[in-house]
Image (cartoon, rainbow, N blue to C red):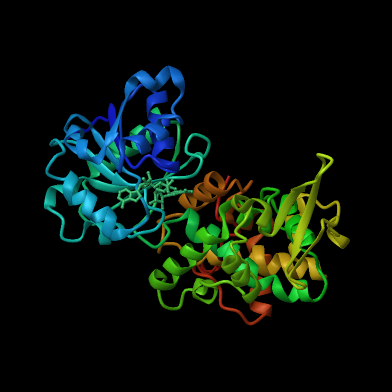
Amino acid sequence: MSRNIESVAVLGCGTMGSGIAAASAAVGCRVLMLDVTAEAAERGLQAVDEPDRHLVETGAFDDLAKIADYDWICEAIVEDLAVKRELFARVEPLRKDGSVISSNTSGIPLRDIAAGMPPRFQADVAITHFFNPVRVMKLFELVPGQHTTADVIEAFANFGESRLGKGVVHAKDTVNFIGNRIGCFFMLSGLHLAKPFLEAGMTQETINALLGKPVGLPPTGLYGLIDLIGLDVMDLVGKNLAVNLPAGDAGRAYTSFPASEQRMLERGQLGRKSGALGGFGRVQKLADGSKHAETFDLVAEQWRDVRDPDLGDVAGQVLSDVGAIMFDDSEHGRLVWQIFGGTLRYAADLVPEIADDVVNIDNAIRWGFNWVNGPFEMLDAIGPARVIAKIRAEGGELPAMLQVLADSGKSTFYSE
Ligand SMILES: NC(=O)c1ccc[n+]([C@@H]2O[C@H](COP(=O)([O-])OP(=O)(O)OC[C@H]3O[C@@H](n4cnc5c(N)ncnc54)[C@H](O)[C@@H]3O)[C@@H](O)[C@H]2O)c1
């Protein structure tokens, strides 16, 4: 069967649902926006550009029967397996034959969502994982279930790529899929691995600066990125990883926060969303109207003025010298090797577990986390042989794909 998506019923009109509705209406699709209450759906409608709103109908889940008139039923409600399954059980008998159905879950396995559902549901369902903000982020992860048919995946891939202009990444039904599996490892392992450097006197500003532009990451670095996402969200991600990461996965060592970050979470010091309570940083508005930026010092556990980063020996080095930064015989070099290099090594161990090839992993990280290069492109730029030599010198085990490369006799993952 060939499927065509011309209309979308979005269930749940919060941050993500309203973004998906807005993106779909912007390309001319008819859209139905439903939520727990009609008022919630109406609030979501504000995300839709004014000229597109004539394409959108809003309502409450009491109006669920209206989904019968839509090609794609897209679920974007609260991240709770039981609540999602309950809604899908109501949706299934109401949707028309030939329609496709998806969840925007950040990390609940599709096999858990689909377990025990009717065969038609299992054939027509996928995970369509957009990134926030939906209209800005290019990454669109597409995950089939065990019984999803090829025409369903093709319909989602075509719609994502040709209509919405997204970068489609084919992922597997593994915890946190591709982008968040690697991106969250960077953040959670980074918090732990940074501790000895902080205790030895390196500042958070320096760590952020090292893990930003010099290695091709966005300027938010480590702490700025977590401030953006929120410690509460990262805590939930860690708990999901603790349950679902396979035995022996390197990420199992980093599924909970270090002690000072745990105390921040308990105080409600979650990041940008916490206003004056802040996160790792905050900007205070003074009585005279000026702004004052502060850093929460993780060693002293108190606020202090922002300091300039001290890039030491690696100051002035640029992205093309990333290998030089990583192998620099200094505290700066060791930090980059452990945190950024550790994330590259982690990614290199996840093929074929989370994706069948390195291209899907590189695309997911570039499009979902705005890295200049994906992990394998970065390894190629540094020189895999240097990385392999350093891991061996440290007595470490080679990640799967570096072993494959070493065995193949080739020197890079990509050829001209
Ligand atoms: N926010 C992100 O950055 C992000 C990114 C990718 C995926 N996701 C996933 O997208 C989904 C939606 O996340 P969001 O950030 O838009 O959340 P949100 O809190 O902004 O919106 C959640 C929606 O669920 C509805 N809801 C709450 N309780 C409900 C219930 N018991 N039954 C039915 N609906 C209920 C709310 O009314 C709201 O419209 C989640 O699965 C989340 O994990 C979020």
User: In the rendered view, would you say 36 is above or below 163?
Assistant: below
Q: Please provide percent x and percent y for residue 1.
A: 16, 35
Seen at 52% across and 69% down, the residue is 407
Residue 121 seen by the camera: yes
Q: Is residue 66 left or right of residue 57?
A: left
42 and 331: which one is in front? 42
Residue 162 seen by the camera: no
Q: Please provide percent x and percent y for residue 99.
A: 19, 36
371 and 387: which one is in front? 371
Q: Please provide percent x and percent y for residue 10.
A: 31, 37
Query: Residue at the bottom extreme?
Result: 395
372 and 206: which one is in front? 206
User: In the rendered view, would you say 371 is above or below 303?
Assistant: above
Seen at 72% across and 69% down, the residue is 298
348 and 110: which one is in front? 110
Q: Please provide percent x and percent y for residue 176.
A: 43, 59
User: In the rendered view, would you say 79 is above or below 60?
Assistant: below
Q: Is residue 164 left or right of residue 92?
A: right
Quarter assignment of residue 240: bottom left
Quarter assignment of residue 26: top left
